[in-house]
Amino acid sequence: MNNLRVFWNRYGLLIVAVLLLLVPQFTTQYEFYVVQRGVQNAMLVLGLVILIGYTGLMTLGSAALLATGAYTYGILLLRLGWPPLLGTIGAVLVTTLVGTLLGFPAFRLSGPFLVVTTVGFGEIVRILILNWEPLTRGPYGLSGFRAVMPTTRGVYYVMVVVLALLAVVTERIGRSRLGLAMKAVKEDEVAAEVMGVNVRRVKLISNALTAALAGLSGVFLASLTGYLNPDSFTANESTTYLLMVVMGGMSNVVGSVISSLFVTVLPEVLRFLAESRLLVYSLILLVYLRIYHVRSSKARAKSAGSRGRS
Amino acid sequence: MEMEKNSGVVLRTEGLTKRFGGLVAVNNLDLEVYEGQICALIGPNGSGKTTVLNLITGIYPVDDGRIEFCGEQINGLPSHAICWRGIARTFQNIRILGSQTVFDNALLGKGYGNGGAGVFQIMFDTAKHRRERAAFAEEVDEVLKFVGLDDVRSELARNLPYGRQRILEIARALVTRPKLLLLDEPAAGLNSAEIYTLMELIKKINATGISVFVIEHRMELVGELADWVFVLNYGSKIAEGTFEEIKENPAVIEAYLGKGRD
Amino acid sequence: MSVGLWIQIILNGVAMGVLYSLPALGISLIWNATGLFNFAQGDLLTLGGYVMLTLFGMMKLPYIVSFVLTLAVMGLVGYFISRIYFYPMLEHRVHPQIILIGTVAASVFIRNLILVIWGTMPTTFKNPFGTKVMNLGGIFLMPHVIWILGIAAGLLILLQYILRGTMVGTAMRAVAQNQTAAWLMGIRNDRMIALTFCMSTAIAAVSGILITPIIPLTPDMGGLISVKAMAAVLIGGLGSFSGTLIGGIAVGVAETVFATLVTPTYKDVFIFLVLVAFLLARPGGIFRAHVSEKV
């Protein structure tokens, strides 16, 4: 059992990546599309691993960052005629900038207050997209831009490779001094600050990285669908991303990738869920939080009781 | 003249004042800690001792007065910058990261943002990052050995017994390479064997040239360790001197035992 | 612009604002009792509106009966949410971030439950206060504006009485101040917290019932209302009763004035910007309730 775990820790990511590369061989066109969406979601969720899992900053604004990335890409290509690669870079940069600005409220706010700000941010972005018609075509949706790669398979292979690299990097950050600083910010901000962690900078970096990943995910989303509509970036989407990262174990990189794929694919497998997808998800999440966390809190209290004293 | 007076003074506060609403928690406090000294700050419960530490480490903003560290004014600086200048502290109620290992807890003392490998170097795991990692690991292991926690290096911090968690907090503070170590009631909750270990450790730390400023309740500890004692009551300094002098001081005795009548 | 028109706009704003104040008071009560923010508050409000829709709009029960029944149902819902979900999590000291995620999940659950039961189409029921515009000396108002103000005022007085004037209220406030001490005095924390949830859900439901003449019911309307209620709580100062009330009114008036004078399209954007500016400038709110972090 223990050996299996060591094996999984070492090769889990590789196994997932290889399986993903093989997917196009076995799937119908629609199934393939769903898996593509899963990979694209996983990219964004890796960012949430950093922000929520490591640094402990909650957000419900991820769909808005995704929209920023996707729309910036579309607009840069359509309105300015940039080539896809340049458009990708531009979109990621713009999203990172926006996300970093979003990091400033996190200096003074925490917990619920921060979540309120991110919800507000999400709404602002959605309303702007809906009403800024000359740029975004509002409710009609934006389409007609080129994808990152000429063929769908091309986009997919690039996505899988990028995802694998990002997963490695996220894992690496988690194990580094920066990751430790992030986890310290999550557990005890004051202690971290007093021990020489520049908490503000750590928060900004977390936000910037998360936004960059969301922006990249947005570029791929635009490439996959070829059509962008404000309705695909609602608060519900943000919650689904939250679900993905929580079910993945919050700070577990491979777990989050798998959970993103799983949560994306599940409603296609269970077709009857289509309407009530989120109902079932949120119920699963509620039950999971209630049972798992109460149990682990109990276990922690028990071990503290037997080993230490105070 | 001024220079000469400053040399040897690690920490100086002048007219340090902190108010919470109408309550004056620290009132016009002057302190001086000399290089290589162990100083103690004592006083009855609620006399504002921990507030003084929170002011020195920048957790609370100072209302009035100034704090100087090695001749430089540090009040107004953010806490992490104060740490980088060489002041480390522990907390009265232990604040370690329970879900991280002992090693990682100590490594946290290296902080973040004070130079060293940046985000991109970490992301691409550059040679510089690898070198830094190895150097830090070595340094942390040295400190763990120094305080005697090397046998539990990979244990989760919350699984350590209480006494060793306190030592871990001191180890984390030492990893920051401080010139001045602030200890907030380090003996609270320890048994006598653990207190003995702790005293030996504090002496050993002091012997390496680190000045120590300790808040303590237990008189035997203060008597054993402190070169100089400050006594605080209702936020004001009522006496200072060697432990022997303080013991005989009527104001101190009154503060601790109360007036005869009343 | 004439004074009458101004009064008209402001009164409409106040009526809207009171409807934000009610769920905000619920949030405030729960915050005081448990130290957590209930993100599902807005969705409980929506659920209240829908229950009313079924009782009054579909089953054609008399208005008063439907009103009381809705409050009873929603109170029970609040009570059970606390009993089976939040109190156990609090009791076992689950990390606040997890509980926060729990309230977000609860919000999504309620929203989608409504969607599955009642569908996505915006719905409303007959305006019980009539649709004839009243002319009060040159000020034109819909009758529901007056009714909303009246009912909300009555409810607030009742709430104030329960909290300040009864044993239960005293016990609830004791739990809010110091759980351990209250427990040692023989107060059942679990019951008091469940009761707090029960009350705050019921008041949110009142808002959900009264809001329908102004805004039609949609399953996801709770999200926006939640955020505005939270804005009310934060602007007014966490945990302060009168502050929350005034915060809600401030939000409602600001929104209505902006929508009338500038543009209704960006009224939500405006409120969020105000909120963020407020949070950054004065995290304590106007009526700064005593919040201190022990270091």
Image: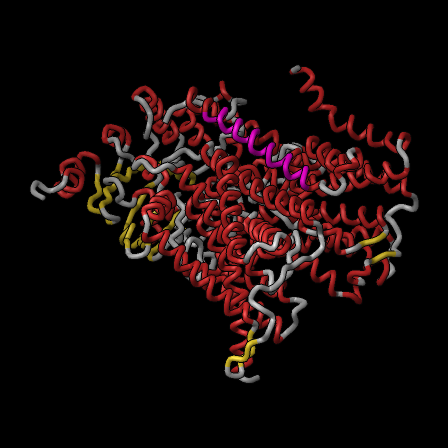
**What residue sits 48% from the left and 41% below the top?**
C79
Write the start and end of the magenta stretch as one range.
A279-301
Count of numbered tags:
0
Which quadrant of the figure has residue A22?
A: top right
Residue B109 vs C260, above or below: the answer is: above
Q: In this orientation, does residue B140 appear?
A: no
Q: Is residue B106 above or below residue C223?
A: above
- Kindly identify the residue that appears in the image at 81 percent across and 58 percent down: A141
Q: Nearer the viewer, residue A39 or C131?
A: C131
Q: Quadrant of the C terminus of chain B?
A: top left
- Tell me residue C219's x, y (percent): 66, 52
A33 lies left or right of B260? right
Examine the rendered structure and indicate whether residue A98 appears above or below residue B228. below
Q: Is residue C78 visible?
A: yes
- Tell me: B129 left or right of A300: right
Residue at 84% x, 53% y is A227
For the stretch drawn in magenta, what is the main secondary structure? helix
Residue A89, position in %: x, y?
Answer: 79, 51
x 69%, y 34%: residue: A256
Residue A162 position, x and y percent, is: 79, 39
User: Between residues A308 and B120, which one lies in front from this camera angle?
Assistant: A308
Q: Is residue A298 magenta?
A: yes
Q: Relative to A72, does residue B12 appear above or below in the rendering?
A: above
